[in-house]
Amino acid sequence: MVTMTLHELYEKACRMLEEAGVPDTAYDAFRLIQFITGIDRSDLIAEGERRIDDRQAENCLRLLKKRAGRIPLQHLLGETEFMGLPFSVDPDVLIPRSDTETLVETALEKAAEMQSGKVLDIGCGSGCILISLLHYLNRGSDETLWKGVGSDISPAALRTARINGQRNHQEDLITWVQSDLFDEIPPETYSFIVSNPPYIPSDVIKDLEPEVRDHDPLGALDGGEDGLSIYRKMIPQARRYLEPGGWLIVEIGYDQKEPVRELFTRYRFTGIECRQDLAGLDRVIAGHM
Ligand code: GLN
């Protein structure tokens, strides 16, 4: 049995995570203790001397030990937030990143001039891009103006995406399709094709943080020898699935702007733009037909 005050538990938690080289120790320590005990930030300051129930303290320490073993915080909590919405996460899907919000915001901006349409998400993983897009595109309207198709090569990822569709009340608007890129996509045209494909060069993967390298699905990271192999297959095929004026919007690695822009140009996309994420890194390429 461990008997501790909230303050002692928090200090120990930070120490455990720091020693393990976890990047965001204070935040992760707080979130895990909050998950078990239900405390909020002000309790940490005002109620530091409160004694934590022994069982709860042990449960916190058990989770903290896992986090110190570099299991991602999101896997321990079972969820994360993306575009202000809750998403269930598990080892079958890439954990949604705030970087990817740049892609969603770019699509929302382009869609502002359109009344309605269809969105295709290639390699949807958790479904966070498609689900958040449809949430914001249809918000405040009585009719369903926007619908979508979410595809992934992984049936396990699609199971999680489906759960997230239900969780965010978008299930009726989305058709989920198991497909290797466009292979099984219904032969229709879409106003938007969005994608965050795997784009890390194969031999860079071993150098990634353990949370990513050991816990995100490899199939969602590995972009082949130079990281560009999925773009080379996807960009030429995308035209056939876009309406006139339709947009292809993809996430890219910080150093992939030039080669991906070149692929957009070669396959006759116009109005090609690059957007940066909050860290100022090139993160999104968009172009239309
Ligand atoms: N942005 C992710 C990372 O660097 C990679 C996602 C991807 O390959 N699409 O961890």
Image: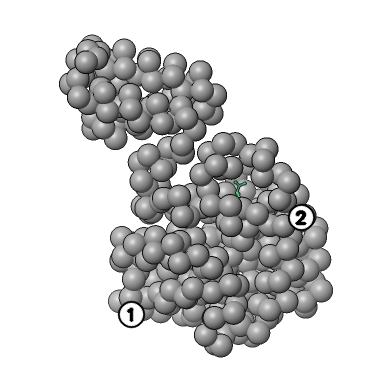
The answer to whether residue 119 shows anywhere in this view is yes
| Res. 230 image quadrant | bottom right
Q: Residue at 51% of width from left, 27% of height from top?
A: 22
Q: Earlier in the sequence, mark 2 or mark 1?
A: 1
Q: Is mark 1 within 8 Å of ligand 1?
A: no
Three-letter residue code for mark 1: Glu
* Front disc: 2 or 1: 2
83 shown above or below 176: above
In the drawing, what numbered circle is on residue 225? 2
The answer to whether residue 40 shows anywhere in this view is no
In the drawing, what numbered circle is on residue 143? 1
Q: Residue at 60% of width from left, 77% of height from top?
A: 182
Q: The residue tagged with tag 2: helix, strand or loop?
A: loop
Three-letter residue code for mark 2: Glu
| Left or right of residue 288: residue 103 | left
Q: Residue at 58% of width from left, 52% of height from top?
A: 218
The 10 Å Cα crowd at callout 1, few under 14, some 14 to 19, many 20 or more, is: few
| Res. 241 image quadrant | bottom right
Quadrant of image for the C terminus: bottom right
> What is the spatial separation of the Cα atoms under label 2 and label 1, in whole angstroms?
46 Å
Q: The residue tagged with tag 1: helix, strand or loop?
A: loop
Query: Where residue 242 appears, x then y in whole percent?
Result: 61, 82
49 shown above or below 228: above
Query: Where residue 149 appears, x then y in whole percent?
Result: 47, 75
Tell me, yes or no, whether the two marked residues, 2 and 1, touch with CB atoms within 8 Å: no
